[in-house]
Amino acid sequence: MVEMRGQSRAPALRHGNIFLVGPAGAGKAAIGELLAAKTERAFFDSNAVVQDASESTILEIFGSGRESKFRMRERDIIAALVQQSGIVLTTDAGIVVDRANRHVLTIYGTVVYLHATRTSQWNHMKKYLEAPSSRPVLRDKHPEAVLAQIECEREPYHVPGSEYNYYRAVLKEMHDERDPLYREIASHTVDVSDLSAEEACARILKQLGLA
């Protein structure tokens, strides 16, 4: 299903830029790289740029308690990247929490929200949970807050092991906080839950009038 929003707000690509926002597990990087290739635009992944600038992995940054410094550096890097023209930029899932990031993304480009259901996110992410490079925000979430979410969760869990409930509850918490913010800044919303990167790219191109 494709939800079309705010067509009157974005009749053409602002500055020729396409900015992809959305939750972890939506496949932003893979879709963004393919989109850039098909539209002959330069591709940037904000997480990769921040890691290069910090000379540390995202996991190392979060694990050392430097998230606030990461977010400040991320804000500066986003402010610089968006002022280019003719790029595809994929962003960290939490980037919309910062008001300044939301503002510059809407000013300098056309924002596409890659929406994914929590089930889809979970299916995409569960294979990474045991990897050393697992999403740091999931690993660092406060257990008491997560347990409270599990208490209120009415959906049955279809995966084995109580440790998985932790991560599913975190995804719910993040969705509830960030979904309204993604929708606030997006000119287009594309549900990529059951799509391959190729299929998602095709739908985005159609939405943007580039197909």
Image: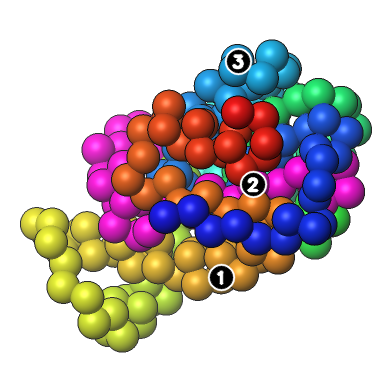
Kind of element beneath mark 1: helix
Q: What residue type is labelled 3?
A: Ala
Mark 1 — residue? 177
* Magenta residues (range): 105-134
How crowded pointer 3 is (Cα within 10 Å; few <14, some 14-19, many 20+) is rated as few
Q: In which quarter of the image is the N terminus?
A: bottom left
**Whether residue 149 can be seen here:** yes
Q: Judge depth for marks 1 and 3 and give the one in front.
A: 3
Residue under the point 78% across and 33% down: 17
Question: 143 and 207: which one is in front?
Answer: 207
Kind of element beneath mark 2: strand
Q: What residue type is labelled 2?
A: Val
- Find residue 88 and report its horizontal and vertical position in percent: 69, 28
Kind of element beneath mark 3: helix
Mark 3 — residue? 37
- Find residue 132 and report its horizontal and vertical position in percent: 35, 32
Q: Earlier in the sequence, mark 1 or mark 3?
A: 3
How crowded pointer 2 is (Cα within 10 Å; few <14, some 14-19, many 20+) is rated as many
Mark 2 — residue? 112
